[in-house]
Every structure is written in structure tokens, then in C-alpha cells.
Amino acid sequence: MRKILGEPSRADVTFVLEESKVIHAHRCILLARCRSLEERVRQQGSKSEERDKLKWGIMHPNHLICHLPQFSQKAFLALMEYLYTD
């Protein structure tokens, strides 16, 4: 599971964090492991534009972007690693 964390090609959500740093993730993992974070994506996420998909190499047609500038990349990545790998 650690291999797919941050892998943009099959990600369906991208979190934009402090200083425009990004982490690519999968909503099905968030739904299974952290309902509140998945709910936040559903409420605050916006559909990505083609230029964003090209920039990150995203292939998912329903890709969402969720802006969370209050989180540091290091802390958020630690949370995501826990969600993906337990």
C-alpha cells in the first residue's frame, strides 16, 4: 500500500498543503480508514482542470483537489502513511 501513496497516475484526490506542496491519494482508502477526511474531500474538494491533471500526471476522470494549507507536508504525509499502512 505504501507504493501507491503519492502515485499520481491512479490517484483520484490531490491534497494541496502548505506552500503548494501536494500529496496524491485515493478516496477509497480515505473512506475505509478515515471517514472525516473523506467527508472533507467531498465537501471542499473541487474538480481538477485538465492542466492540473497534465501537470501531475493524473489519469482519473473524476479527480478532485482539496486545499488544506494549514497542514505541513511532513505531518500530513505521516497521517497518510498511517492510513495506508497502519
Image: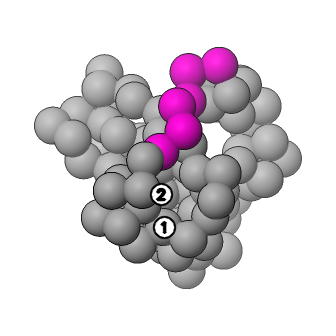
In the image, what residue type sits under mark 1?
Ile
Q: Looking at the image, which residue is at 78% across and 31% down?
A: 35
Examine the image and state in which quarter residue 53 appears. bottom left
In the image, what residue type sits under mark 2?
His
Q: Earlier in the sequence, mark 2 or mark 1?
A: 2
The segment highlighted magenta reads 43-48
Q: Nearer the viewer, residue 73 or 61?
A: 61
Query: Where's residue 54, x and y in %?
Result: 36, 67
Residue 39 among those drawn in magenta: no
For numbered disc 1, what is the local secondary structure?
A: loop
Q: Looking at the image, which residue is at 31% across and 37% down?
A: 17
Observer-side mark, 2 or 1, equals 1
User: What is the distance, in whole Å, between disc 2 and disc 1 at their CAs?
Assistant: 9 Å
- Compared to 5, does 74 lie above or below? above
Which dot marks residue 14? none
Residue 47 among those drawn in magenta: yes
- Outermost residue toward the bottom in this view: 3
- Compared to 44, does 5 lie above or below? below
| 31 to the left or right of 23 | right
Does residue 50 appear in the picture of this structure? yes
Query: Where's residue 68, x and y in %?
Result: 39, 27
The reply to whether callout 2 and callout 1 are in contact (CB within 8 Å) is yes
Q: Which residue is mark 1?
A: 58
Q: Which residue is mark 2?
A: 24
